[in-house]
Image (tube, rainbow, N blue to C red):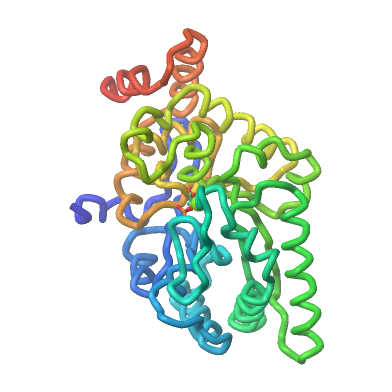
Amino acid sequence: AQERYTSIREKPAVTKDGQTVNLLMNAGLMADLPSLENSGAEGVGLFRTELQFLVRNQMPKRSELVVLYQRVMEAARGKRVVFRTLDIGSDKVLPYMKPQDEPNPALGWRAIRVGLDKPGVMRMQLQALIRAANGGPLTVMFPFVAQFEEYRQARQEVDKTIEREKRLGHVLPSSLEVGAMLETPSLGFAPLRFFEEVDFLSIGGNDLKQFFFAADRENERVRKRYDSLNVSFLSFIERIVERCDISGTPLSFCGEDAGRPIEAVCLAAMGIRTLSMRPASIGPVKSLLLRVDLAELRNIISDARHRGDQTVRPAVMEYLRGL
Ligand code: PEP
Ligand code: MG
């Protein structure tokens, strides 16, 4: 099936009305890296670092992490890689960490909450990333940020680690971007100042949807009730896009919906111009992007919202069938 898309692999994703959408890939293991060449991805929009922790039976050493991250950066050959710091807890439990007895793990002690409360592992990871960058650019992203202060604290950890590395005589990254995932509704309502301070944002649609609709992403029975093209959810996405436009914050979307062609073109129509997805989705998503007119699609979405439709999907499907 991938062969079908080889002819458009090197083509940029430019829509009928001349809008360019950047297509990036999600990765997490070394085995994913060859796809960076084959898929036509312009970079790695989400590198899930916890996967390399999950496939082991003991905590990796810093020196091992340096080697791993170096290999990732080398395989990327100068393309940007967004390293997401450990996103553990909830569905991702490290076999060598004390299990937490929590009634609602998805709402529990996870991701950046662990990183800020017990900063040892986060510091080690940041050091390893800085050393692996070896004087080149570095991009770090924190998962599951729910309020401005958490981002500020995490950023302080980055600054402190940079200072420490400098004192130790290590070469510092030529440039450093520190972003956050927007995957809790609260962060969408953070003060504008937050949007100004953060270097970039990436919407984690899987978690964002789960918390927006209060519907467990692992529970098919409840999850299926809520369409990603639900008008309330799209209103929220629109709000985030507007905030980012005002503050000039680069915004991307890296949940599974970015890799679903219909959802992807709708996200692009809502103003999200960078999408990160599993490598195999890049071809199908690009193929549809090349055929749509985002301004037209935006009007169709807008009309459906004004009519009070629950989801814009039927209207969008009708438009796509007419192409
Ligand atoms: C998300 O929540 O949408 C996301 C990209 O992160 P993960 O699926 O790893 O939680
Ligand atoms: Mg997530």
Residue 218 lies, in percent from the top left, at 37, 46
Q: Residue at x 47, y 72 (%)?
A: 76
Number of numbered tags placed on the structure image = 0
Measuring 53% from the left and 41% from the top, which residue is drawn there?
208
Residue 298 point in image, percent of width and height: 49, 23
Vertical order, 311 against 15 (above or below): above
Hey, which quadrant is residue 136 in on the image?
Answer: bottom right
- In depth, the one of 79 and 153 nearer the eye is 153
Does residue 283 sit above or below 155 in this rendering?
Answer: above
Residue 115 x %, y % = 65, 66
Instruction: Locate residue 306, reporting x and y percent.
Output: 52, 10
In-image side of 85 versus 255 (left or right): right
| Quadrant position of the C terminus in the picture | top left
> Which one is nearer the viewer's eye here, 247 or 62?
62
Placement of 146 over or under 124, stated as above or below? above
Name the image quarter holding residue 35: bottom left
Q: Find residue 316 and report its image quarter.
A: top left
Query: Where 318 falls versus 132 (above or below)?
Result: above
Residue in view at x 47 percent, y 81 percent:
71
The front one of 317 and 291 is 317
Q: Residue furthest top?
A: 307
